[in-house]
Amino acid sequence: MGEGSASRTEMTSPVLKFDHVSFGYNGRTIMSNTTFDIHSGEIVVLLGPSGCGKTTILNMIAGFIPITGGEILVGGLPVKGPGPDRGVVFQSFALFPWRTVLDNVAFGPKMRGTRKAERERIAREYLALAKLTEAAGRYPNELSGGMQQRVGVVRALANEPDVLLMDEPFASVDAQTRMTLQEELTRIWQQKRPTVIFITHDVGEAVFLANRVVVLSKGRKLDEIDVNLPRPRSWDELNDNDAFKALSNRVLQLVRAA
């Protein structure tokens, strides 16, 4: 059925180290001594109930909020604030409404000083990857929600970050579009192999997307599960897959215990 997920033992040193990190404010501890590594080419899904610290972790990795203890390293360098080595895809589409789809995707390369012809080539390559070539000259308000979010994903990827951070990016679209976007993300991942940290509270989404699911509870890592389901993945195949159901049930039990 295709290749499976690479094991962590086959991978190089971590792209991201979340090393004994603590976070708190107003005298209140939100997270204490949390540690995990993420390797090149993994899709790691952070999962847990509301208030468990998923988005806080993503915001710390993005450099949006400072940590109060420990260290976060991306590419061996400590995170001191936002930077182009980390791309972020939010739940809101966050596209520039005054720019065409092509110009939205070319924005990151433009900020890096890439020449116009080259950045347009890069943007067109990623639009083709997301099956959005025909939308290149349109504006965001002319696109469906699902198309806008696909633009948001490839806009972040076109900047070639070390790590792509995705904060519940498919939560605001309908169920059918969400499933399509999940399949699109895995297809794009197959071709480009970005390192992805994906935030969700949906167990099925987590298992469908992930190489590894990290379950969080009250700001700490409760457990992690390798997802060794073959790729490429599609909902038509996995809906009746016993291994998928077993993994989903195992993850669900961990979340319920969180």
Image: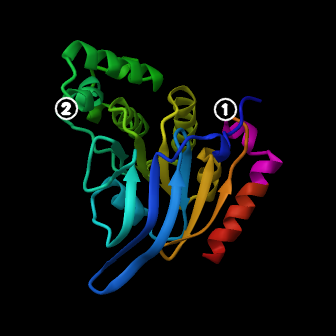
**Chief secondary structure of the magenta span?**
helix
**Residue position for label 1:** 232
Q: Amino acid at mark 1?
A: Pro
User: Which residue is found at the position 62% from the left and 51% from the top?
Assistant: 212
Q: Which residues fall within the magenta stretch?
A: 233-245
The coloring applied to the image is: rainbow
Is any part of residue 8 visible from this angle? yes
Measuring from the top left, give residue 72's x and y in whole percent. 38, 58
Q: Amino acid at mark 2?
A: Met
Tell me the SS state at disc 1.
loop
Side (left or right) of 217 relative to 133: right
Category of crowding for the residue at label 2, using alpha-carbon neighbours closer than 10 angstroms: few (below 14), some (14–19), many (at least 20): few
Q: Which mark is residue 111?
A: 2
Could you say which is closer to the camera, residue 178 or residue 105? 105
The answer to whether 154 is drawn above or below residue 102 in the figure is: below
Measuring from the top left, give residue 38's x and y in whole percent. 52, 50
Q: How many marks?
A: 2
User: Which residue is found at the position 39% from the left and 48% from the top?
Assistant: 76
Could you say which is closer to the camera, residue 91 or residue 123? 123
Measuring from the top left, give residue 97's x and y in whole percent. 21, 37
The answer to whether 207 is drawn above or below residue 70 in the figure is: above
Marks 1/2: CA distance?
Answer: 33 Å
The answer to whether 86 is drawn above or below residue 253 in the figure is: above
Tell me the SS state at disc 2.
helix
